[in-house]
Amino acid sequence: MQIHLINQNHVIGLFLFLAILILSSCGGASHHFYATDEGNLLALKEEKDLKVSAGYMPHLNSLPGNNLNVQAAYSPIKHLGIYTNYFRIRNAFDGDEEIQQNVYQYHFGAAIGGYIYKQPEAETEVADEDKLIEQYTYPKGKGLLFDAYLGYNQGRNKNYFFEETGTIDIPFQKFYLQGGAHIFMDRINASFALKYSRLNFLDGEAFGKLTNLQLKKVEVVEKQNPFDFLESSLKVAYGKAENPFQAYITIAGIYDFGDAFLEIQPSTMQVGITADIDHFFGKKKKKK
């Protein structure tokens, strides 16, 4: 399989296009019972790869929430990936009936899946002109990666209503199937993942002084449960191939299907750092 490398400007343009598409296609609720994380975007390429990342985004102007996402991924054998993450988001705003509301959600999860890494066409160099010896090398750090994960998340969502001093606390479980594509270039990497999710809310609690409208929303969630929908994630990372650290930015969103859907946080964003841990242990990369 020959891989023709894409110009970095094309990747940046594609990222901006998909980012606009994600943000314009996602639901627009001003408060939520669920918010998405950035997805399984730690790209494992080969056996013994071990990577971690941490991303954070504070509440800035119209950007919703302040959120934290921590991930780790490991490949015990070639083509097999194991993944885990922790996600937390907080958001404060004036909700319905102009009642100040604070939303707090966290979840943790794990996933298992497979990956296929394809390097670009080898470059040929003449090592000895007299003996006509040719040497084949691969462009460092470049290639394409495709992966798929089956995962599970468990967490809870809490809505605090300050004027009424009431609280809605709902635990949830989520099963999902994610497919992803990643492209690696000289210094810029880009990833896109699409996830089919089933969200199941468990028995929650509502206590304190709550309005009929607030209680009605909990009833709607219980009646419509479970929820099936799509989530997407887009990531651009920057860093030299030989550098174990890369800076990145991600945008994640939820595609809202149906007229009576649960209230959602339409999109989340993080900036962070990814670290290639096996680099520090001097792991010898296998030649492709």
Image: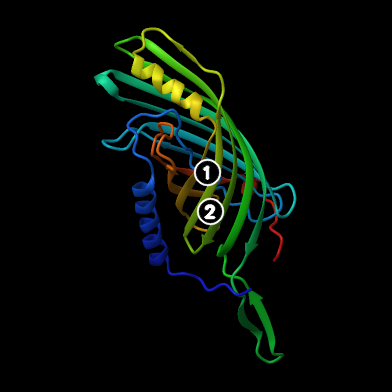
Residue shown at 64% from the left, 44% from the top:
150
Q: Residue at x 52, y 50 (%)?
A: 194
Checking the image for residue 39, the label placed there is 1
Foreground of the two, 183 or 153: 153
Residue 243: image tag: 2
262 over 27 or under it: above or below: above
When the figure is inspected, residue 20 is found, relative to residue 99, above or below; the finding is below
Please report the residue visible at 64 percent of the width from the left and 40 percent of the height from the top. 111
Q: Quadrant of the N terminus?
A: bottom right
Q: Position of residue 28 (x, y in %)?
A: 34, 38
Quarter of the image holding residue 287?
bottom right
Asked if residue 129 is positioned above or below residue 146 in the image, the reply reads below
Foreground: 20 or 275? 20
Between residue 58 and residue 40, name the one nearer to us: 40
Q: Secondary structure at mark 2?
A: loop
- SS of the residue under disc 1: loop
Could you tell me the amino acid type at mark 2? Asn
Left or right, 136 with reference to 102: right
Above or below, 142 relative to 2? above
Looking at the image, which residue sits at the far bottom? Answer: 130
Colour convention: rainbow
| Labels in figure, total | 2
Q: From the viewer's perspective, tell me whether residue 111 is left or right of residue 17.
A: right
Q: Which mark sits nearer the N-terminus, 2 or 1?
A: 1
Could you give the CA–CA distance between mark 2 and mark 1, rounded to whole angstroms? 23 Å
Which kind of residue does numbered mark 1 sit on? Gly
